[in-house]
Image (cartoon, rainbow, N blue to C red):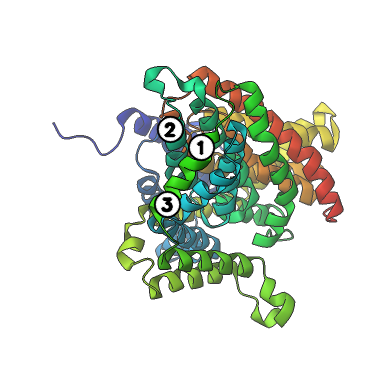
């Protein structure tokens, strides 16, 4: 019997939810029928993504088809399909896709592994030092790896496992507590922190940038540099605190690791001297950071300023012209093309929800409910942030979570009087902090959890504690830093 191309029950639930909203629930006062139908399609799509009815790219194709065919955006068929495809001209979508293609070079050339082993060769004499080496290795490559799964699971995780096995710490032998459990936790919890620090450190961040722009009527445009500077100090504070907190929470049996530095040096010796392709990859890495930070404009004026996405295209072009990446490499980067597709579909639906007036309607009702509680903008902001953070227990996708809730929560918080920039920034950070919570929170978590070094209970306990720690750091350190930067 042939295998179905979709999971039956998640598909049935997604379709049922769509039809229930559209046909069974009376149209609320203040909304048009098109707005209500758009909501039904949107919620059904999110339900399909949460239930993993099909791969997210396939779900997105179906969603685009339904939006265009239903005429929910326009009675004109030509206009309807143009609306359904409108988001693919959004430069942020292309920024992430191209950046994922560029990050393939870190794996192909071996530069990512070299950076990791280099840090360990310097700081790896103690287990805590190895933890910091893993954290700062991930931080060093985060700006150009929008796939946090590729960064944490594809580049850093093999290094972490190599070190753990070098000290005979293997789950199958019951020796996880020697060193492997601790290193696996640091390997994972570096990922949400670094993801929060750069627009290009995880795929959903540009979606957040777009939703912030929509929620503020384009008054707040988070550029790459604005985001990076705002997240710098709280991110560094979190990176410095995390390995120590996990060390105290799950202390490894092995605390002195004098052989780790030599092990890392042996790995570097196997890699040999830095090769031509690695040098070019490192050059592109540095060029992109300079362009994204708009450093040339400081010396040559605004005439040399480039759009962030233009800079990413230039970086990929250099890698193609020098042969570091081939076109086959680019075509094989399925994650990039998949991201391009689903990202465009989700942004399109979020935009249409806003244009039909549904976000304003929902936000007004939610605002009225919170106002009745009499907790003021500070209490309301705390409620919104905590709700947004901990509802991630019900999501297996940060993208689905952000798409479902971010726009409305931003609108409500701002309407209730929260200082715009700090509230926007804490919500942006929370969209990555929430990755800490579960073993299904983001693509990196099942990779590292699947290596078997931690029990489910240990993973969830560490995840909850680190979510609290990270949130406190971002509120206190971030709040003071943003005040110093003049954001409020």
* 105 to the left or right of 332: right
Give coordinates of residue 206: x percent, y percent. 58, 55
In the image, taking residue 3 as reference, residue 358 lies left or right, namely right
Pointer 3 residue: 269
Q: Which residue is mark 2?
A: 166
Q: Nearer the viewer, residue 282 or 79?
A: 282
Q: Residue at x 60, y 46 (%)?
A: 136
Q: Nearer the viewer, mark 3 or mark 2?
A: 3
User: Please, what secondary structure does the residue beneath circle 1 have?
Assistant: helix
Mark 3 vs mark 2: which is more N-terminal?
2
Residue 233: percent from the left, percent from the top?
Answer: 75, 48
> Residue under circle 1?
260
Residue 162 appears in the figure: yes
Dot placed on the residue nearer the N-terminal end, 1 or 3: 1
The answer to whether residue 28 is visible is no
Q: Is residue 9 above or below residue 107?
A: above
The residue lying at 82 percent from left, 54 percent from top is: 487
Q: What residue sits 51% from the left and 37% below the top?
A: 260
How far is mark 3 from mark 2, CA to CA? 16 Å
**x and y percent of residue 323 in the render?**
36, 71
How far is mark 2 from mark 1, CA to CA?
8 Å
Q: Say whether marks 2 and 1 touch (CB < 8 Å).
A: yes
């Amino acid at each position: 019997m042939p295998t179905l191309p979709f999971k039956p029950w998640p598909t049935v639930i997604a379709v049922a939810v769509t039809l229930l909203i559209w046909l069974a629930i009376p149209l609320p006062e203040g909304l048009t029928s098109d707005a209500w139908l758009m909501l039904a399609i949107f919620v059904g799509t999110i339900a399909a993504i949460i239930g993993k009815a099909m791969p997210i790219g396939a779900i997105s194709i179906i969603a685009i088809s339904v939006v265009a065919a239903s005429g929910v955006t326009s009675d004109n068929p030509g206009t309807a399909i143009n609306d359904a495809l409108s988001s693919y001209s959004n430069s942020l979508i292309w920024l992430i896709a191209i950046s994922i293609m560029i990050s393939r070079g870190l794996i192909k050339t071996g530069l990512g592994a070299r950076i990791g082993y280099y840090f360990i060769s310097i700081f790896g004499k103690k287990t805590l030092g190895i933890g910091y080496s893993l954290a700062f290795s991930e931080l060093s490559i985060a700006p150009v790896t929008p796939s946090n799964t590729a960064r944490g699971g594809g580049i850093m995780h093999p290094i972490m496992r190599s070190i753990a096995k070098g000290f005979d710490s293997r789950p199958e032998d019951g020796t996880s507590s020697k060193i492997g459990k601790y290193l696996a936790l640091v390997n994972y919890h570096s990922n949400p922190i670094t993801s929060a620090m750069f627009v290009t450190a995880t795929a959903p961040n540009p979606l957040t940038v777009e939703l912030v722009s929509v929620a503020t009527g384009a008054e707040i445009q988070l550029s790459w540099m604005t985001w990076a500077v705002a997240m710098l100090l709280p991110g560094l504070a979190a990176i410095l605190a995390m390995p120590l907190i996990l060390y105290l929470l799950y202390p490894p049996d092995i605390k002195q690791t004098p052989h780790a530095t030599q092990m890392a040096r042996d790995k570097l010796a196997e890699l040999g001297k830095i090769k031509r392709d690695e040098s070019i990859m490192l050059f592109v890495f540095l060029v992109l950071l300079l362009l994204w930070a708009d450093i040339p404009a400081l010396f040559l004026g605004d005439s040399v300023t480039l759009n962030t996405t233009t800079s990413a295209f230039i970086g990929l072009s250099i890698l193609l012209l020098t042969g570091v990446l081939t076109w086959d490499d680019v075509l094989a980067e399925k994650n990039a093309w998949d991201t391009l597709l689903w990202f465009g579909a989700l942004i399109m639906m979020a935009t249409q929800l806003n244009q039909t007036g549904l976000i304003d309607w929902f936000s007004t009702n939610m605002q009225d409910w919170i106002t009745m509680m009499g907790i003021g903008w500070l209490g309301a902001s705390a409620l919104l942030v905590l709700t947004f953070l901990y509802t991630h227990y019900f999501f297996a996708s940060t993208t689905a979570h952000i798409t479902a809730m971010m726009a409305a929560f931003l609108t409500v918080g701002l309407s209730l009087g929260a200082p715009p920039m700090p509230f926007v920034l804490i919500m942006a950070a929370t969209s990555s902090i929430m990755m800490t919570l579960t073993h299904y929170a983001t693509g990196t978590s099942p990779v590292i959890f699947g290596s078997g070094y931690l029990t489910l209970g240990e993973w969830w306990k560490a995840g909850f504690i680190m979510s609290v720690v990270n949130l406190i750091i971002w509120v206190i350190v971030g709040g003071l830093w943003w005040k110093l930067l003049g954001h409020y």
